[in-house]
Image: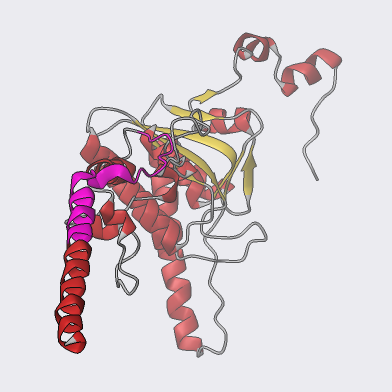
C-alpha cells in the first residue's frame, strides 16, 4: 500500500518541478525579448563625415551593431568591405583621413609630381638630352596643351645638350630634334621658349624656333650650335659608313637651313660659324638672332648702358690686330 501511495506522489512532484522549470524558461525568454537588441554599444571614435568608408561603418554600427559582433571567422573578403554592395577603395592612401580631430590641417590629397604641376601651368620642361623617351613625352605634352586650349601660349623651358651628351657622345638620332621641331610648327598656339642652363645643337634650334618676339634667355645661359656627329660605326663595312656619313651631311644642311630661317641670317653665315662649335652667351645669342630678349629681371637699362668691348678698346686706344 505504501508502495502504491509513493508512486503518484513522486510523479506529482516531478510534474510540479517540470512546470516550474518551464515557467522559468518562459520568463527568461520574455525578458530577453523585451531587452533592446542594440543595447551593446560600440565605442565610436570621431568620424570624418566626408569619408564615405567611415560614414558607412558608422551608419551600420548605429543601426545594426550585431553586424559587427557576429563577424564570420572564415570570411574571404577583407574586414568590413562586405558591408558595401560594390566596394570602392580609396584612390590613394593619402585620401584616407583618420578623423576630424587627428591632424585636420594636413593635406587631403598627395601633392602631384613636378612635371604635372608644370604641365598644369602650360610649361614643358626639356631638361635632358633628346632621346626617344624625352621626344615622346614632349610631343605628347604639346599635343595635350593644344587640345586643352588652342589660344593660350605654351612655354618651353630648355636645358638640354641636344642629341649629344655634355662630353659630345651621340645619344640620340638627329630626327629626335626634328620631330619636336615639326610638332612645334604644327601647333596653333604661341610658343614661348626660355633657355635655362644650356641649349646645344638641336636644343638651340628649338630655342630659336619659338614665336618671334617670345624667345628668351637667362643671363648666364649658354647656347651652342655645331655640326651633327656620326654615330659610332663599330665594325660596320665601309659602304655602310659612307651611307651614314651622307645622312649626317643631309641632317647638317637641314639644320643650317632651319637655323638661318629662324635667326634671319644667311645659310652661308650659319654654315661658316658651325664649322667648329660656336658658343654664345646671352648677349651674343641675342645679337645672332637666336633669342629676342634676355631675362635680366630689372637690369635691362644697366646692361644697355654698358659699352661694347670694341668701344672700350677704341676708348682705351687699343687697336685690334688680326691674327697672323
Answer yes or no: is residue 312 visible: yes
Residue 224 coordinates in the image, percent (x, y): 59, 45
Count up the numbered dots.
0
Residue 122 coordinates in the image, percent (x, y): 37, 34
Residue 108 in the magenta stretch? The answer is no
Residue for point 63% across, 51% down: 277
- Classify residue 262 as left or right of residue 291: left
> Which picture quadrant has residue 15?
bottom left
Instruction: Quarter of the image for the C terminus: give it.
Output: top right
Specify the farthest residue to the front.
1
Answer yes or no: is residue 290 visible: no
Residue 305 coordinates in the image, percent (x, y): 67, 9
> Which picture quadrant has residue 174?
bottom left
- Classify residue 311 as left or right of residue 163: right
Q: Nearer the viewer, residue 123 or 289?
A: 123
Residue for point 34% across, 64% down: 78
Q: Name the colour scheme.
A: secondary structure
Q: Which residues are magenta?
A: 23-48
- Classify residue 238 as left or right of residue 209: right
Residue 26 in the magenta stretch? The answer is yes
Question: From the viewer's perspective, is residue 27 above or below residue 155?
Answer: below
Instruction: Quarter of the image for the N terminus: give it.
Output: bottom left
Amino acid at each position: 500500500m505504501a508502495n502504491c501511495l509513493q508512486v503518484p506522489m513522486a510523479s506529482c512532484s516531478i510534474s510540479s518541478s517540470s512546470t516550474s522549470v518551464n515557467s522559468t524558461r518562459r520568463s527568461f525568454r520574455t525578458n530577453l525579448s523585451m531587452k533592446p537588441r542594440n543595447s551593446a554599444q560600440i565605442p565610436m571614435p570621431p568620424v570624418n563625415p566626408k569619408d564615405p568608408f567611415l560614414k558607412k561603418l558608422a551608419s551600420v554600427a548605429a543601426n545594426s551593431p550585431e553586424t559587427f559582433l557576429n563577424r564570420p571567422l572564415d570570411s574571404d573578403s577583407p574586414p568590413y568591405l562586405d558591408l558595401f554592395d560594390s566596394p570602392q577603395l580609396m584612390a590613394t592612401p593619402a585620401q584616407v583621413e583618420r578623423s576630424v580631430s587627428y591632424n585636420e590641417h594636413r593635406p587631403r590629397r598627395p601633392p602631384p609630381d613636378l612635371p604635372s604641376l608644370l604641365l598644369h601651368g602650360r610649361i614643358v620642361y626639356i631638361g635632358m638630352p633628346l632621346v626617344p623617351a624625352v621626344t615622346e613625352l614632349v610631343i605628347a605634352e604639346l599635343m595635350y596643351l593644344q587640345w586643352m586650349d588652342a589660344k593660350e601660349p605654351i612655354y618651353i623651358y630648355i636645358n638640354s645638350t641636344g642629341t649629344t651628351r655634355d662630353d659630345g657622345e651621340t645619344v640620340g638620332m638627329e630626327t629626335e630634334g626634328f620631330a619636336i621641331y615639326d610638332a612645334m610648327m604644327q601647333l596653333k598656339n604661341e610658343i614661348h621658349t626660355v633657355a635655362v642652363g644650356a641649349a646645344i645643337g638641336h636644343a638651340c634650334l628649338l630655342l630659336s624656333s619659338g614665336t618671334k618676339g617670345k624667345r628668351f634667355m637667362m643671363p648666364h645661359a649658354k647656347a651652342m650650335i655645331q655640326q651633327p656627329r656620326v654615330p659610332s660605326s663599330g665594325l660596320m663595312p665601309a659602304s655602310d659608313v659612307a651611307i651614314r656619313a651622307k645622312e649626317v651631311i643631309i641632317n647638317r644642311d637641314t639644320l643650317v637651313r632651319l637655323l638661318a630661317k629662324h635667326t634671319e641670317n644667311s645659310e652661308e653665315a650659319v654654315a661658316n660659324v658651325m664649322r667648329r662649335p660656336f658658343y654664345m652667351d646671352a648677349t651674343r645669342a641675342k645679337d645672332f638672332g637666336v633669342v629676342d630678349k634676355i631675362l635680366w629681371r630689372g637690369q635691362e637699362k644697366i646692361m644697355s648702358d654698358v659699352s661694347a668691348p670694341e668701344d672700350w678698346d677704341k676708348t682705351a686706344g687699343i687697336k685690334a690686330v688680326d691674327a697672323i
